Image (spheres, rainbow, N blue to C red):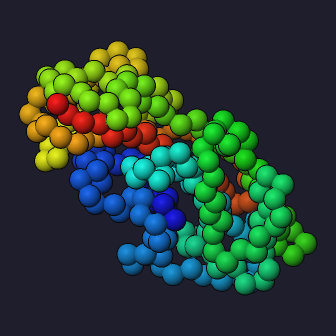
Amino acid sequence: MRHQWQRLAVTCGLTALLTLLAGCTGITQHGQGVSDHGVPAPITLADTSPAHLSVEIGVNIGGYAAATRAITEIAIQFTSNGRLVQFTKGETLSCNGASPIHLTTEYDQQVATPNVAHALYTCVYTSGHSSGVIQFRVPGAPQLLSPTEGASIVRGSATPVRFQAQGALEGIVALGTQSKAIAHITAPGVAAVDTSHFAAGAGSIALTQFPAVADAAATAFASLHANCTAIAQIDVTWT
């Protein structure tokens, strides 16, 4: 799955963002779960009724790779005392009216972003005769309005970038073949970035933000934590 589950991810700074853009993909790499990198292995519980579980919701909108830019990943995990729970008793989760799925550790669904943006996402968890309801509203995707995908851009000391985003903006970064630069917000929805030192050739502009997950509730569960990472990226050519 692409979503990073460590809660400290929502407080990472532009240093982590630039490292990621430069090729370190620890934040959104497929195949990495909660138990990677020395984190305790999942546990089994004698009682998996909602009152014994904490709910972790992760929403990941867009991505740096072209294949993920129009995709939203919704992941739900259940923990106890900070450890991921392994399900072995036929526990199920049904979301948005779909047929229940049998849980092993986590629920992970990838959908087209326009199909879920701003929509209320509702899931019913069942363990034996006990059940609980989880719901949250999926944030909308940020947009890079200008330049547009595939544009040829003249390099300069204040290359303008126009964007639309809701929630805390982590940063806007421009990349060249061997260079990167952080944009500075100059007005609402407007930024400028120094690309004068970029070499001519292929590049990109990426926006990262952490929008709030509204209307989040987990009826009958011990606790709930929800976060969202939203990314917009375009490929450009620096001239």
Residue 17 percent location from the top left of the image: 30, 48
Name which residue lies at 51% across and 81% down.
41
Dividing the image into 4 quarters, which one contains the C terminus? top left
Q: In this rendering, is residue 189 above or below 231?
A: above
Q: Residue furthest top?
A: 187
Residue 49 percent location from the top left of the image: 79, 71
Name which residue lies at 42% across and 59% down.
28
Residue 132 visible to the viewer: no
Nearer to me, 27 or 135: 27
Nearer to me, 92 or 155: 155
187 left or right of 93 in image: left
Count the numbered circles shown. Answer: 0
Name which residue lies at 55% across and 49% down.
71
76 left or right of 96 in image: left
167 left or right of 109 in image: left
Quarter location, residue 150? top left
Residue 90 percent location from the top left of the image: 80, 80
Name which residue lies at 44% across and 43% down.
231
Residue 145 percent location from the top left of the image: 42, 25
